[in-house]
Amino acid sequence: MTDEKIIRELYETLENRRDHPIDSYTSNIMKNSSKTAEDKILEKIGEETAEVLIASKNQDNLIHESTDLIFHILLLLVYKEITLDELLDEFQTRMK
Ligand SMILES: N=c1c2ncn([C@@H]3O[C@H](COP(=O)(O)OP(=O)(O)OP(=O)(O)O)[C@@H](O)[C@H]3O)c2ncn1[C@@H]1O[C@H](COP(=O)(O)O)[C@@H](O)[C@H]1O
């Protein structure tokens, strides 16, 4: 699958990991522990943002680092129970 449907499939997987936790990276990060789940996800977004800046300046790994950042933003939205359709609707309202 190499079209935009992969984002919807990923989103559904993340919602499933949130609602039916297993022992996996995304389920574990969305669980509460000593740090709240939200703080852990926000910390990852901060790290991945810095990695995108460095990758862009170094002309290296920009796709890989951007994917990590986008992935963690999607994870935050799923954790906050925002649906993919709400995100897409927001983009739609900006279409000219
Ligand atoms: N797309 C991703 C995805 N992208 C990044 N990551 C994880 O996010 C973390 C990124 O953190 P780091 O950058 O610190 O990790 P890293 O490996 O050192 O990365 P780099 O330094 O190389 O950039 C790693 O542990 C990655 O495994 C992801 N983990 C899961 N998914 C997808 O999410 C879905 C659910 O995943 P699980 O919960 O693992 O089943 C599956 O469809 C997966 O394909």
Image (cartoon, helix red, strand yellow):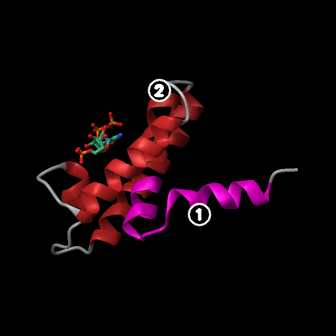
Separation of residues labelled 2 and 1 (CA atoms) = 30 Å
Depth-wise, is mark 2 or mark 1 nearer the camera?
1
The total of numbered circles placed on residues is 2
- Disc 2 + disc 1, Cβ < 8 Å: no
Which residue shows up at 24% across the image and 60% down it?
29
Q: Residue lying furthest right in this view?
A: 96
Q: Main secondary structure of the magenta part?
A: helix
Front residue of 15/68: it is 15
Which residue shows up at 44% across the image and 31% down it?
64
Q: Is residue 27 left or right of residue 56?
A: left
Q: Is residue 88 left or right of residue 27?
A: right
Which residue shows up at 21% across the image and 68% down it?
31
Query: Looking at the picture, how far across and down is residue 48, in whole percent?
Result: 43, 48
Q: Is residue 83 above or below residue 5?
A: below
Q: Is residue 38 above or below residue 69?
A: below
Q: Secondary structure at mark 2?
A: loop
Label 2 amino acid?
Asn
Q: Is residue 5 above or below residue 79?
A: above
Query: Looking at the picture, how far across and down is residue 79, in whole percent?
Result: 37, 66
Tell me if residue 79 is in the magenta stretch: yes
Residue that numbered label 1 is attached to: 86
Tell me if residue 88 is in the magenta stretch: yes
Residue that numbered label 2 is attached to: 61
Q: Is residue 23 above or below residue 63?
A: below
Q: Secondary structure at mark 1?
A: helix
